[in-house]
Amino acid sequence: TVFGQSRSKEVACLKMHPDLEPSTGDWSAYPATTIRRLVRNFGISKGADIAVECDLPESSGMSSSSAVICYMWMVLSERNDLPSTKLYQQELPTPEDLYAYLGFIENGQSCGSILVGDKGVGTFGGSEDHTAIMSSEPGKVKLFSYCPTKQ
């Protein structure tokens, strides 16, 4: 992964494990938190090699942490074919339910009684960011409400 203005390159090898411990304060906490939650909630077992380059300034408030949660979801969901599972279809039946779930991955909240949360990445917020990232379409403006997420 290439980050920010410094263009520093960093690598993290993260295991698919329900007890994966994210490194507090490190960029890898976001992909690690996503992996841990998906393993715990959906039992995923297939990982992926992912490379990302970003020129946003670190800690700039531009939703880069939410983007990490979203891209990890997109890759691992596809790799493990989550949308075809009964659990996914029951617990995340609408796009808005998925957007809320992605926010819950980051903040650690449970998504209903089945998709149980944990400590997340240690921040509370950003749920609207996940919705904006996942639902955006060129040339369109959308209006959502939150808690629960609804369009």
Image: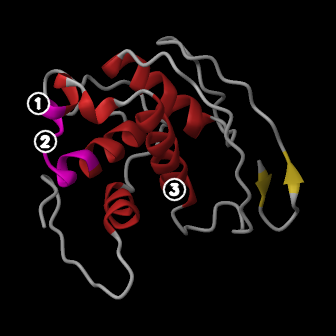
Residue named by callout 3: 67
Residue named by callout 1: 90
The span picked out in magenta is 89-98
Q: Is residue 127 left or right of residue 91?
A: right
The image shows residue 89 at horizontal and vertical percentages of 16, 33
Q: Nearer the viewer, mark 1 or mark 3?
A: 1
Measured Cα–Cα span from mark 1 to mark 3:
25 Å
Q: Nearer the viewer, residue 77 or 106?
A: 77
Q: Image quarter for residue 96?
A: bottom left
Q: Secondary structure at mark 1?
A: helix
* Amino acid tagged 2: Pro
Residue named by callout 2: 93
* Amino acid tagged 3: Ala
Q: Is residue 17 left or right of residue 11?
A: left
Callout 2: 10 Å neighbours few (<14), some, many (20+)? few
Is 96 included in the stretch rendered in magenta?
A: yes
Please name the residue shown 44% across and 41% down the image.
73
Measured Cα–Cα span from mark 2 to mark 1:
6 Å
Callout 3: 10 Å neighbours few (<14), some, many (20+)? some
Q: Is residue 84 left or right of residue 90?
A: right
Please name the residue shown 69% across and 39% down the image.
26
* Amino acid tagged 1: Gln
The image shows residue 116 at horizontal and vertical percentages of 26, 22
Q: Secondary structure at mark 2?
A: loop
The image shows residue 36 at horizontal and vertical percentages of 48, 22
